[in-house]
Image (tube, rainbow, N blue to C red):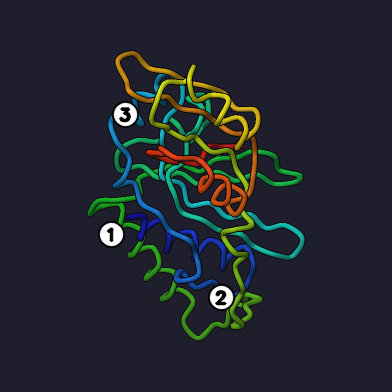
Amino acid sequence: EGRDACRKIAILSSIVSGRQVDFEDIYTEGITKITAQDMRYAKEMNMVIKLLATMKQEDGTIGAIVAPFLLHSEHPLASVHGVFNAIFVRGNALGDSMFYGSGAGMLPTASAVIADIIEAVQNRNRHVEMGWDDSRLAIAPIETSSCRFFIRIKGIAEERLAEVQKVFGDVTVIELDHMDEFAVVTDVMTEAEYEKKAKELSGIRQRIRAEV
């Protein structure tokens, strides 16, 4: 259900901002509703579905979300499997950079805990300035977050495409053989815009966010 990833992005957001970020304030959605059909569509689009915990700092505000995302197979995070975790960073000057390694299991966890204990012991009676502000940092509402949306819709594309385009505008259509449905990928829109439009269209079976 994304709880572990939520706490990790809360910690990382706190480090980045220098202020307290509470995990309860972060919108969190797990992968339990992802189906085999979703993965078939992803494969057809040369994409993969990954549980991402994302944070973006812009204009003095921070937006954070934990949810399944569709990533192109060429994206560095697409190759992260098993017990491995990765942190993908995009900076104004740095560009793109990724830090990758074991993120679960007895030995990796023990290694991290022991490393912290050793550092604490080595710094006894020393004050290490962190530039920390205990004030709670507000997270931007999920409704303001923007992305593309992958949507599975009941029916035949040829019969319903005009209806879908009337609601969502230009979309990319994906069809699989022997299915009583089709899928589309929208242009970039906010979460609030998607929710409003989705109420105008019947037969939506699934919605997954997609990388911009």
Residue on which disc 2 sits: 20
Q: Element at badge 3?
A: helix
The residue identified by callout 1 is 110
| Location of residue 79 by image quarter | top left
* Residue at the spot 53% in from the left edge and 44% down from the top edge: 200
Q: Which residue is mark 3?
A: 37
Q: Position of residue 184 (x, y in %)?
A: 51, 28
What element does badge 1 sit on? helix
Residue extending furthest toward the bottom: 125
Residue 66: percent from the left, percent from the top? 46, 54
Mark 3 to mark 2 CA distance (whole Å): 39 Å
As drawn, 120 above or below 196 = below
Q: In the drawing, what numbered circle is on residue 74?
A: none
Q: Residues within 10 Å of mark 3 (few under 14, many from 20)?
A: few
Q: Earlier in the sequence, mark 2 or mark 1?
A: 2
* Secondary structure state at the residue bearing disc 2: strand
Q: Amino acid at mark 2?
A: Gln
Q: Are marks 3 and 1 in contact (CB under 8 Å)?
A: no
Image marks 2 and 1: residues in contact by CB distance under 8 Å: no
If you read the primary sequence from the N terminus, does the residue marked by circle 3 or circle 2 appear first?
2
Image marks 3 and 2: residues in contact by CB distance under 8 Å: no
**Percent x, y for residue 181?**
37, 25
Q: Quadrant of the N terminus?
A: bottom left
Residue at position x 69%, y 39% in the image: 95
Q: Marks 3 and 1, how far apart in space?
A: 38 Å
Residue 204 in the image: state x and y as whole percent: 42, 39
Identify residue type, mark 3: Gln
